[in-house]
Amino acid sequence: MDRVRSRSGRTVVLAPDKFKGSLDAPGVAGALAAGIADVAPHWEVRRAPVADGGEGTVEAVLAAGWEPRTVASRGPVGNPLTVTYARRGPVAVIELAAVAGLGVLPGGRARPLDAGTAGLGTVLAHALDDGADEIVVGLGGSASTDGGAGLLTGLGARILDTAGCELPYGGAALARAARLDLSGLHPRARTSRFVFACDVDNPLLGPDGAAAVYGPQKGADPEQVRLLDAALARWARVLHDATGRDVAGVPGAGAAGGAMCGAAAVLGATRTSGVRTVLDLIGFDRTVDGADLVITGEGRLDHQSLHGKAPTGVAAAARSAGVAVIAVAGECSLDDEALRRAGFAGVHTLTALAPDSATAILEAPSLLRQVGRALATADTSLPTAPARAAHRP
């Protein structure tokens, strides 16, 4: 990227997450860039769309120049899917949501008991066959609560009941798990490095575990939550018998329906911050070097945004580089003090420019372009303190 700019220009980094229901992260960056170009075509604009390790992770790294790989796989209930992941050198980046997420359930119908992660294992095996020796898996948006059992079967493992029969898809079937046969595990699975990117620290079991906390989000009723928690407890014992590792209580073992648990026990997978991992993968520190301003954001800025979400991760990284940050959001419920503590010098919202939220979602591309023009028009000194800009409480 050419980093030379005119003396009268500014260098701006556009590092938004997706606006869910409106635009993906590259689309948000593109709309903002178009607005800036309308007013200040002499500015240098560096696009660096981001994600928090969940949905949009592969899009973000592909936008940073990684190479796409495509593989035929299976969705959460065995439905055929074509999945794209990213590759650069020995590293592959795979997104769980793309192959085992709520968004790829047939008809969008929740299947809390029989949804699984076998398709993710298939994609992992493809990356290993393709020569990758480090695989980053972005967690988030999982449709299943199977403790990573399906992930392992997709890599060649077999999960057997007391009669020696293989178990079907899903977490509920783990109530019958008796033995984990690893003899057919992919030959490179034990020697490659697996990194799971997420900011969830829940254990596998109990009131803070995978079933209790996230099962209802996947359609599980109270009785199904109890069933799944008991099935995961049995699965944890089977994992321990097969590997000698007791990982059920490890922080993050309950992430993505417990996918982290099976991967940690058998593959030695480790957990890292979702947004920080994405920023490293896209080379954000190099992108922000020498910039005057960073613009980030997501569809809704609220108190959840302060805990491991992409905009606050971007703000922290930009602050470390000494660069001011402005947020752009569909809507924002944070007050000035919360914004300041999070590192934002100001916020623009689409709801301030539209008559209602539905219009803001529908017309996000044109409204974001309008925000880009407003930011370029207000080319004064860099912001140093929170200043509400086009924001309606």
Image (spheres, rainbow, N blue to C red):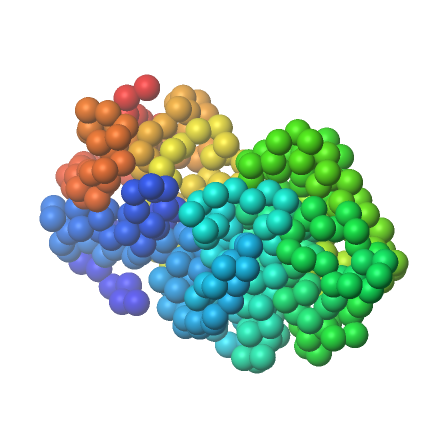
- Left or right: 354 as drawn, with respect to 169: left
How many labels sit on residues?
Answer: 0
Relative to 106, say whether 329 is above or below.
Answer: above
Relative to 208, say whether 110 is above or below.
Answer: below
Query: Picture quarter containing residue 388?
Result: top left
**Looking at the image, can residue 375 be seen?**
no
On the rendered image, what quadrant is the C terminus found in? top left
Q: Position of residue 389 (x, y in %)?
A: 26, 28
- Left or right: 318 as drawn, with respect to 130: left
Q: Residue at x 51, y 67 (%)?
A: 73
Q: Residue at x 15, y 55 (%)?
A: 42
Front-most of 75 and 294?
A: 75
On the rendered image, what quadrant is the N terminus found in? bottom left
- Left or right: 103 as drawn, with respect to 130: left
Relative to 133, say whether 372 is above or below.
Answer: above
| Extreme-left residue of the structure | 38
Q: Residue at x 69, y 31 (%)?
A: 223
**Looking at the image, can residue 301 be seen?**
yes
- Left or right: 363 as drawn, with respect to 144: left
Q: Position of residue 342 (x, y in %)?
A: 47, 33
Q: Residue at x 68, y 65 (%)?
A: 153
Front-most of 325 and 4?
A: 325
Q: Position of residue 331 (x, y in %)?
A: 33, 29
Relative to 225, say whether 114 is above or below.
Answer: below
Q: Position of residue 168 (x, y in %)?
A: 67, 57
